[in-house]
Amino acid sequence: MRLARSMAVGWALHFKQESRNPFFLWIVICTPLIYATMAYFLFRGGTDGDKLVGAAVGTGMMGIWSLTTTAAAAALQWRRRSGILELLVAAPLPFWAILAPITIAISALGIYSLLASMLYTRLLYGVSLEIEDWLAFAVAVPVGILAIGLLGFMLGAAFVRFRAAWAVGNLFEFPVWTICGLLIPIAVLPAWVEPVAWVFAPTWGMNALRDAALGDGSPWDDIAMCAALSVVYGGLGVILLRVFLGSARRRGTLALS
């Protein structure tokens, strides 16, 4: 109970704190608008209007992932620079219970990204955003955000190990949203990419959102798979964080210098 309460308080605190960061707000609002503009001009030449709806949702999810990788890396880099990271690692609370609320809170800010992308394409370009299954869509959004947050938590173990956390965060940004098919269909990517894509929960989350929006199929199986992979990410993140923390202690890389 104490651990759950600490994580809930940590999530609320970091959500409030990061939502007032001008740099993060720039990423969460402006990045999806840039993506949405490019996607609109890329897809408007086709005859299938549903692709524009999928593109609007996809660019919003791209903004969530971009924010999670960049902002989580920046948050840990700031804590390392200010000397707080060592204190957090030495705290009685397990460090995974400190890091996970940070990444989940940052990904939760991405709801602004999704809303901004959809409203932008609707108001500026007149794209009709008709959602076929609102219930499934409303369930898929938080599940997808949680999946991205826990994927960021798992990859965030590397942020603790390496001093150049910012560079590591940027390294994960574009490959992941490309492989997951958030904007580019997986079918047009090389054949070896598809098996890799199904390992990433955002792939299932994006499929669920697309199916809920367009009514192409049942999104519930995708939602369940996305949630299951999120649990796996949480467990792997705890293990990887323990390994990377041990390495960081031995090499003395928790401090900036």
Image (cartoon, helix red, strand yellow):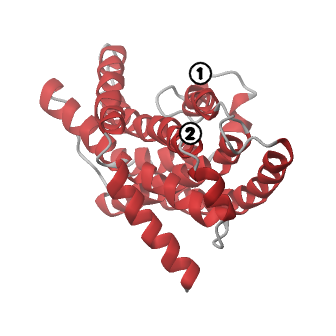
Q: Which residue is mark 2?
A: 81
Residue at 62% in and 35% down? 165
Residue at 30% in and 14% down? 41
- Distance between the alpha carbons at the discs numbered 2 and 1: 42 Å
Mark 2 residue crowding within 10 angstroms, few (<14) / some (14–19) / many (20+): some
User: Residue furthest toward the bottom?
Assistant: 1
Q: Quadrant of residue 30?
A: top left
Left or right of residue 16, residue 90 in this image: right
Q: Which residue is mark 1?
A: 188
Residue at 42% in and 40% down? 61
Q: Position of residue 68 (x, y in %)?
A: 49, 42
First in sequence, mark 2 or 1: give its number: 2
Q: Amino acid at mark 2?
A: Arg
Circle nearer the viewer, 2 or 1:
2
Residue 194's place in the image compared with 93, above or below, is above
Circle 1 SS class: helix
Res 248 seen here: yes
Of 193 and 92, nearer the camera is: 92
Residue 166's place in the image compared with 15, above or below, is above
Residue 139's place in the image compared with 57, above or below, is below
Left or right of residue 67, residue 192 in this image: right
Of 6 and 88, nearer the camera is: 88
